[in-house]
Each structure stands twice: as structure tokens, then as C-alpha cells.
């Protein structure tokens, strides 16, 4: 997470992961954590095996650094989106949903690796990762519950609806293509309508 | 897909995969396709390595047989659900969504492996798998479009809504636990409300 990104949560330039993490992202996305050797990683990064070990103690440490960097960016953008929106629940909801949608459109590979390789994290790191993911869910929960309490959202099940909204946004990563038929802004607009349908009840 | 399952699309007994595919399911779910050797598979199945090769030519063939068996069951249940419901779009929608929800609650590991290991299928098998997955999506598309045409569903974006409904149902596999707080029937009831919200527009 770099300051310029936080300054504009809507803008996605090329991913800015350090060299080894960027190589790990591609390797894990293609053949999975257990199917990737440190030799594969070094080759993808254009480094020697000792070159990789110079920066990271182990493949496990690389996975942890990668998924935590992904989660830092996600949470940083979500916080910036909320901070940029007026205080009312509808505006907060729209900003947060838009940020989640854009992240899962423009960080597809990151989202795929983070969600599929939770299983490969050692227990302590897995707990830390899941805690941060829960933090993201709670941001959304708070906004939906505030809207339901204020009578702005009609859903009788605010927490189920908030989880479904997260699922909708995360799901975009599984089918969005930059050369697809929908312009990104149009895609965001349609999915905001869908997300609002989930909280209307 | 066995006939008794088709006769009752709501009932899930223990999975009925053949021994080697059942072992492959557990191995691939835990360490991924590329992280699993034929030796791992044989050990998990309680067979010798030649015993595994007696039934399957390769690890790739086992993956193909597994994901196709999962897809056969999904499509078979979806068709049975549609056949069991009255002809009107609302009833067809509810039956199909309920079937998709139950499948992703009770076949979580199958759904995880099928969706994460598409990348590991050889091109021809991948095409076949994606075609069948598209068939499932088109079933849902047809029901939502019929409802929108009939004025029963108000969504201005029936195809985006139909995809979001599929995402909602598939997403259940990522968090549902049989010992969780929600009774399966209550979970289905709440998610039917959420799914209807997506097509209301």
C-alpha cells in the first residue's frame, strides 16, 4: 500500500508488488503454492535461488508476505473510499461497494491466490489473515446495519445481506476480463444496483 | 449421478464418488492438483500406485473424471429441481436457486476443487468443463429472462442479475459449515430472499 494509492482509491496502475512477491503471485496463480518450488519462483523473478533466500527465509514467508500485502491494499482502499464519502449510510455503502468491485476487477489474480491459498498458510498466519479479512467484512456489516437501523435499507437480514454483497464483489474477480463487453464504470454502475437490491429486502 | 439422487434433488447423503475420485477430491482440496502426486493419491485411497493406474491412465484423467462427475451431479439436480416446480418463472427461479444453494452447502469441497483447478485442466477438457458450467448458467439466465419478460422480475439487467444469483449460491460454499449457527432450511429461506432482491431491480 503506497500513499498515492490511498489518495485515490479508484485508480489502479500496474501492481506495485516487490519483485519476488510479483513472481510468486504469477507462480501460485498458475500452479498453486504446493506446486511451486523456490527454483520456479527464482526463475520467474529472474533471480538465483540464493537471491530469493537473501530476501525471504522460506516459501511460506513469501506466501504470508504476498497475501498480507494484498489484504493491506484492499483494506487501505476500503478505508479511503469510506473516508471520501458523505456520512449517510447509502453514500457509505455505495463508496465501499464500488471500492470492493474495482479491487476485484483490477486485482483478480491477487484475489484468486489469497482466497485459494488460505489453506496453505501455517495456523498462526492463517488466523492473522482471516482476522484481516473479517475486518473487511465488518466494515461492510457496520454500513449495512447502520442503513437498516436508519430505515434506509429494508432488509430483515442485514448481516446475511452484507455477506452476500461481499460475495457479489469478490465474485467479479472470477469472470471480469479487461477486454470484456462491459466498460468498467458501467459494470460498477450495474453492480451497485444489484448490491442495493441485496440490502433492500 | 445416480437415479435416486435425481428422484430427490433436495436430499444429500454421503458423497458417492468412486474410491479414487473421492481420495483425489480430498488431496486436491488440501494441497492442490500440482501439489498432489499419484503416490499421495494411492496412499489416500488405500491402494498401490499400480492399483490407481489400473483404473486411470494419469493424474490428469483423474482430475477430468472428478470435475465432470461434480458437474454431472450439479446439472442433474438443477434439472430435477426445475422439473419439480410449476411452470411460472418465480417458482422455477426459487427451485433452481434452492438447488444451487443446497449443492454448494453440501458439496463444498467438490465446488472448491472444481473452481480452483479449472486452470489445471488440459485445454480440451477445460473447454468441455466450461461448456457445462455455462450450461448451468444458461439455465438460470433463461429463468430470469423469462421472469423479466413476464414483468415478474423488475431488473433492467437480467443477465447481470442471473450471474450475480449464481455467484451468491456458489459463494455459500466458501463459508457454510454444517455446525454453523444457521439451520440449512433457514439459510435457504434467507438466501432466497436475497436472490429475489437481485432480480427485482
Image (spheres, coloured by chain):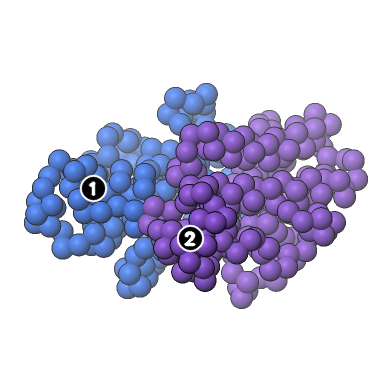
Chain colours: A purple, B blue
**What residue is shown at x 35% (from left), y 73% (from top)?**
B123
Q: Are marks 1 and 2 in contact (CB under 8 Å)?
A: no
The residue depicted at 70 percent of the width and 71 percent of the height is A183
Q: Position of residue A142 (x, y in %)?
A: 75, 34
| Residue at x 52% of width, y 62% of height | A51
Q: Is residue A105 left or right of residue A49?
A: right
Residue B90 appears anywhere in the view: no
Q: Tell me the crowding category of disc 1: few under 14, some 14 to 19, or many 20 or more residues within 10 angstroms, Cα based.
A: some
Depth check: A40 or A93 in front? Answer: A40
Q: Which mark is residue A50?
A: 2
Locate the C terminus of chain A and report the quarter of the image it occupies. Answer: top right
Q: Secondary structure at mark 2?
A: helix
B193 versus A70 height, above or below = above
Q: Is residue A94 above or below residue B59?
A: above
The answer to which of A74 and B127 lies nearer the viewer is A74
- The picture places residue B60, in percent across and down from the top left corner, at 26, 62
Residue holding disc 1: B40
User: Residue B192, can we see it?
Assistant: yes
Crowding at mark 2 (Cα within 10 Å: few <14, some 14-19, many 20+): few
Amino acid at each position: 500500500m503506497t500513499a498515492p494509492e490511498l489518495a485515490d482509491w479508484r485508480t489502479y496502475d500496474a501492481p506495485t508488488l516487490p519483485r519476488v512477491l510479483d513472481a510468486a503471485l504469477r507462480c501460485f496463480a498458475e500452479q498453486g503454492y504446493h506446486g511451486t518450488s523456490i527454483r520456479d519462483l527464482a526463475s520467474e523473478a529472474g533471480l538465483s535461488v540464493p537471491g530469493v533466500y537473501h530476501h525471504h527465509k522460506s516459501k511460506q514467508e513469501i506466501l504470508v508476505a504476498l497475501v498480507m500485502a494484498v489484504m493491506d491494499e484492499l483494506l487501505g482502499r476500503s478505508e479511503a473510499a469510506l473516508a471520501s464519502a458523505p456520512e449517510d449510510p447509502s453514500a457509505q455503502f455505495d463508496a465501499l461497494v464500488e471500492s470492493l468491485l474495482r479491487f476485484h476487477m483490477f486485482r483478480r489474480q491477487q484475489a484468486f491466490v489469497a482466497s485459494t491459498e488460505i489453506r496453505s498458510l501455517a495456523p498462526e498466519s492463517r488466523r492473522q489473515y482471516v482476522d484481516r479479512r473479517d475486518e473487511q467484512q465488518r466494515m461492510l456489516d457496520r454500513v449495512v446495519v447502520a442503513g437498516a437501523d436508519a430505515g434506509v435499507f429494508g432488509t430483515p437480514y442485514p448481516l446475511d445481506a452484507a455477506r452476500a454483497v461481499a460475495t457479489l464483489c469478490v465474485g467479479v474477480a472470477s469472470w471480469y476480463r479487461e477486454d470484456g463487453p462491459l466498460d468498467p464504470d458501467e459494470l460498477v454502475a450495474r453492480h451497485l444496483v444489484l448490491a442495493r437490491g441485496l440490502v433492500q429486502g
